[in-house]
Every structure is written in C-alpha cells, then in structure tokens.
Image (tube, grey):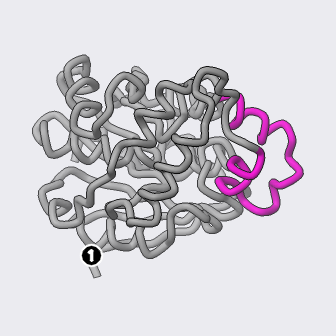
Amino acid sequence: MHSLVKFWSFGQRLRPGKLYGTQTMDVILIPGFMTDASLWDDMLPALETLGSITHGDTTANATIADMARDILSGAPERFALIGFSMGGYVAREIARMAPGRVLALVLVATSARADTPEQTRRKAVAVKMADLKRFTGFSRPGVLISLHPDRATDEALIERVRAMSERVGGDVFRRHTQQFRETDLSRLAAIRCPTLIVAGDRDALRSWEESEELCAGISGSELVRIENAGHMIPMEEPSALAQAIVPWLQEQASPK
C-alpha cells in the first residue's frame, strides 16, 4: 500500500525539535461550509510556528472553482494549503490549478464525492424553508450532527459553532447550499504534492471510507484519524489536530 494510517488523540504531544525548526512556509487556511476564520482560532498558536498564516475566503463565490481562483489570486508565490470540509474541495482545485506553487496539502474532514440526489434535495428544502433575512445560524440539531456524540452537552462549543454560522450569514448560506458539489475522484491523481488526509473517528457527515478514497487516489498521501472527534475537528480536538499537522508540514518545509 502507498498510504500510511496513523491515529492521534489528545494525550499525544508534539516533539519540540520538529515543531520549532528553522524552515518556515506560508500557509493558507480554507474553511468549510458556513464556517469562517474563527474555525482555526484554537490552532493558531501552533500553526503560526510554521510561518505566515493567510485565511482563504470562501464566502464571496458560488462555485468551488471560483473560490479557488479567488484565493489563488491573492496567494503567496509558494504555500501550503489546509482545507476543511468544503475547503478541502477548494484546496484540491487550487493544487490542480497551480501545481508548481503548492508545497503541501492537508485535507481535513473532507471527501471527493459528489452530492447525492438526497443531499441535493435536502439542501433545496433547507434554502426554501430558511428565513434568510433573519438568519440566526444553524439550529441546535444542525450543530449537534457535526460534533462527536459526547459533546452533546458542551454548550460553549455548540454556541461557538452556531454563532459562527450566524456571522457567515443568510446570503452565504444560500450560495453554499445551492451549489452542487461535483466529484473529483477521477482527478485526484493529478495532485502531486505531499498530502496529508485527516478524519475524525466519529464524523457523521464524512465517512472513513471517503477519507480512504482520497488516500487511494492521491499518490503517496498519508491518512490520519483523530480520536474523540466528529466533523468539526479544528474546534473539537484542536491540539490533536495540530499535533498531526504541524510536524508533518514542518517536515515538508525542511531540506531533503
């Protein structure tokens, strides 16, 4: 097999020698469906040891390709990408658009599959039923499905996710929801940069099989599973996610 599967939990610790290397890189963070830059807040201290951090904006455009072009237009000459959920689709599109500029790719809680007919139907119903002028963010059940079952009583985290979706707003909810997400499974082989794929062990929105498909399709990629995490890994298990990502990216920046 070309892939490597690892398991991370909160109890594991970063190795300082790997984290605080002398090599730096520019890193672009790309959020997902109805999320903003605050998604990464708990991880920023660790991520900033890598170098300059840029937050990619996915709110202004209606398609994955347009989001990718917009982010790429303001990107440094060479950079690493970390894409979460829908942001993983955007990150892969950027890696194909500008293969010579992407140093490394990290895909968190994402997939290469297209929307199913049922997902398309549910999204159409959600837009129709939502009061976009008085949009107050995701409902409590809508937040809970994105979290590990053990976090059903974590009121602070639930409110952070809801408030984030409210800040992103009704107009973006309509744009994100009306977008049909196409598969790129047949185009994964075009990605040639080092790639790390990260999945939560209890993600109800993206399955382990979807992460395995990404790993099988991207040559030389590595697959990591984060324990005690649902879909919102950057907010649920930021330390474990940083422990998986930061040393790996530091290794990509080091001279071979």
At x 65% / y 33%, what residue is drawn?
42
Q: Residue 249 location, x and y as percent? A: 38, 44
Does residue 218 appear to the left or right of 126 in the view shown? left
User: Is 150 or 119 nearer to us in this picture?
Assistant: 119
Magenta segment boundaries in residue numbering: 140-164
Q: Residue furthest front?
A: 128
Q: Residue furthest top?
A: 74
What's the amino acid at mark 1? His
User: Is 89 or 242 nearer to us in this picture?
Assistant: 89
Q: Residue tagged by mark 1?
A: 2
Quarter in which the N terminus is drawn = bottom left
Residue 180 part of the magenta segment: no
Q: Residue 61 location, x and y as percent? A: 32, 27
Q: Residue furthest bottom?
A: 1
Q: Residue 226 location, x and y as percent? A: 60, 61
Residue 150 part of the magenta segment: yes
Task: Answer with the quarter of the image where residue 161 lies.
Answer: top right
Does residue 37 appear to the left or right of 217 in the view shown? right
Is residue 4 shown to the viewer in this render? yes
Task: Answer with the quarter of the image where residue 204 lies.
Answer: bottom right
At x 43% / y 24%, what residue is drawn?
55
Q: Residues within 10 Å of mark 1 (few under 14, many from 20)?
A: few
At x 56% / y 44%, what residue is drawn?
242
User: Is 140 or 210 nearer to us in this picture?
Assistant: 140
At x 37% / y 30%, what residue is drawn?
27
The secondary structure that dominates the magenta segment is helix
Is residue 45 shown to the viewer in this render? no
Q: Is residue 138 above or below residue 27?
A: below
